[in-house]
Image (tube, rainbow, N blue to C red):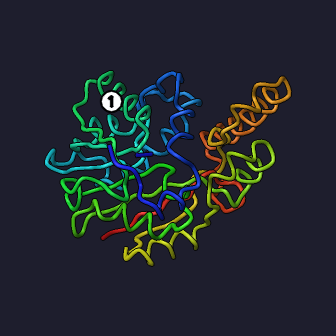
Amino acid sequence: MRDHDSGGAHEEDARASKEYWNSLWHERQLPPAIAVGDQSLRNHINLKFHAFFRKTFDSGKRLSNELRLAELGCARSVWLPYFSKEFGFQVAGVDYSSTGCDQARAILAREGVDGQVMLADIFSPPQSLLGCFDYVVSFGLVEHFQATDECLRSCAAFLKPGGKMFTLIPNMNGMTGWLQKVLEREVYDVHVPLDVEMLVNAHETAGLRVLSCEYFCFLNFGVLNLNRFRESRLGRLLSQVLNAIAAVSWLLERIGIIFPANRATSPYVICISTK
């Protein structure tokens, strides 16, 4: 996530500490870029996200380069260069992990994209960032805070009036959450399990108008954090089996057999709201 500390109540509210995130990202290789031209099966989920964002951001038409987009919780972000290249946004990121920020800057430099990455906390950000973004996005942020509505209210403070916010969280109420809980409970415990209805209510309580909120994708076990579990032979084998099951479902989708997104199997919940 996010030179500012989250103050008192927010520090206690966070399910995961700054030290947790720094240790998680330390010495890990940088993730590859979002490659929208890669039609291989391994890129299936990224292509689904690309299709979603093309629909969300004016059917893929290149937008004015005066529009600004902020990613909150931007550690190691491959989405900042993606949004700049695909839609022409001026991009900025905020995270309170110094390691995560350094890696986000390295990815921007690697992709040849100008962007600002701020080491700051979303609950006490620099005033220069408030009320100045047309879009705010987060990929797995708000579910790490017990008071989801307070976190969303802090996220919305970055938006201009009328700006839109995209919130993605893992679906910890379905199969993904159950597997995470059984296989690596300590990772599950840094999440607040939220379903569609709970996420809608939290946005509305935060003063946002929800435009859509839905489960996204049918299956993707790649969302699971099983790093310690994979250290064992059994863990590696189970991971391979899960990935193979997901790949079969993606292949069936490619040939026209569509499986609906749903509460039980979908890996994500996506909400779009406006200020």
Dot 1: what SS? Answer: helix
* Residue 164 as seen in the image, left or right of residue 148: left
Q: Quadrant of the C terminus?
A: bottom left
Name the foreground residue: 123 vs 272. 123
**Looking at the picture, which amino acid does disc 1 mark?**
Arg
Q: Residue at x 36, y 60 (%)?
A: 155
- Report the residue that reaches farthest toward the right: 234
x and y, in percent, of residue 57 in the image: 31, 53
* Residue 59 as seen in the image, left or right of residue 219: left
Residue 150 higher or lower than 35, as above or below: below
- Report the residue that reaches farthest toward the front: 8
Q: Residue at x 40, y 58 (%)?
A: 166
Q: Quadrant of the N terminus?
A: top left
Q: Where, by quadrant of the figure, is residue 127 drawn?
A: bottom left
x and y, in percent, of residue 68 in the image: 21, 50
Disc 1 crowd rating (10 Å Cα; few below 14, some 14-19, many 20+) is many
Q: Where, by quadrant of the figure, is residue 234 drawn?
A: top right
x and y, in percent, of residue 149 in the image: 47, 70
Q: Residue at x 68, y 35 (%)?
A: 247
Residue 23 higher or lower than 110, as above or below: below
